[in-house]
Amino acid sequence: MPEGWVIDYMGNPTTNPNDLYGPPEGSILPMAGHKGYGLSMVIDILTGVLSGGGCSRKGVRNFYNALTLISIDPNQICPFDNFSEPVDQFIKYVKSSSPITEENEVLIPNELENKIRKKRLAEGIAIEEKIWDSILKAARDVRVNTDQIHASQ
């Protein structure tokens, strides 16, 4: 395990994953030092408390899949152009960065997924014949009429 990921129960850095699980238990370190620590606390509080899933605490072994959504309407804070123009400039600036390799491009969040979605809407989704047959069988097992379902070649 790389250095900087875990500390043992005494707070010493370790590369041994068994030091995390103990006994006594160590701890996973947040990425980005104190900023990651602060961000992880905010996320634990917002998702744990607001969703009812509970925050991390001593003695808890079962964690729940908690979710909190926060929606911000920029129009309630400033005129939309005052928000959208700097965001557009920021995206252009980020995308103007040199990619790691020439065959790659710098992507912003969700850009890859949108490209894949567009491609799949145009070309469909490739499914191996064996998998497709098992999907059809599962559908028939629950009495779905598969006569009108066609796989394009």
Image (cartoon, helix red, strand yellow):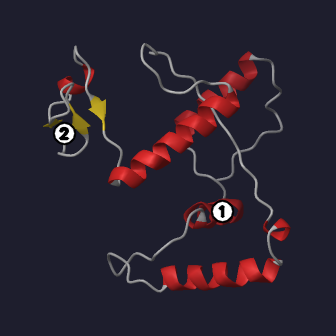
Whichever of labels 1 and 2 marks the residue nearer the N terminus, that label is: 2
Above or below residue 140? Residue 42 is below
Kindly identify the amino acid type of the residue bearing the numbered disc 2. Met
Q: CA distance from mark 1 to mark 2?
A: 41 Å
* Residue 147 seen: yes
In the image, residue 62 lies at what x, y percent? 49, 16
Q: Position of residue 120 (x, y in %)?
A: 65, 59
Which of labels 1 and 2 is toward the front?
2
Q: Which three-letter amino acid code belongs to the residue tagged 1?
A: Glu
Tell me if residue 77 comes above or below residue 135 in the rendering.
below
Q: Which residue is mark 1?
A: 123
The disc placed on residue 148 is none
- Report whether 78 appears left or right of 17: right
Instruction: Please give the name of the residue rendered at 65% of the width and 36% of the height, measured from the top-left corner.
Output: 67
- Which residue lies under the disc numbered 2? 1
Marks 1 and 2 in Cβ contact (< 8 Å): no
**Measured along the vertical axis of the image, is residue 95 above or below residue 129?**
below
Q: Is residue 128 visible?
A: no
Q: Could you tell me which secondary element the residue under label 1 belongs to?
A: helix
In front of the other: 107 or 118: 107
The 10 Å Cα crowd at callout 1, few under 14, some 14 to 19, many 20 or more, is few
Q: Quadrant of the N terminus?
A: top left
Residue 144 percent across, percent down from the top left: 81, 24
Q: Which quarter of the picture shows residue 115?
A: bottom right
Q: Residue at x 58, y 36 (%)?
A: 45
The mark tally for this picture is 2
Vertical placement of 124 versus 119: above or below?
above
Q: Secondary structure at mark 2?
A: loop
Please tell me which residue is depicted at 76% across the width and 17% down the height of the picture.
142
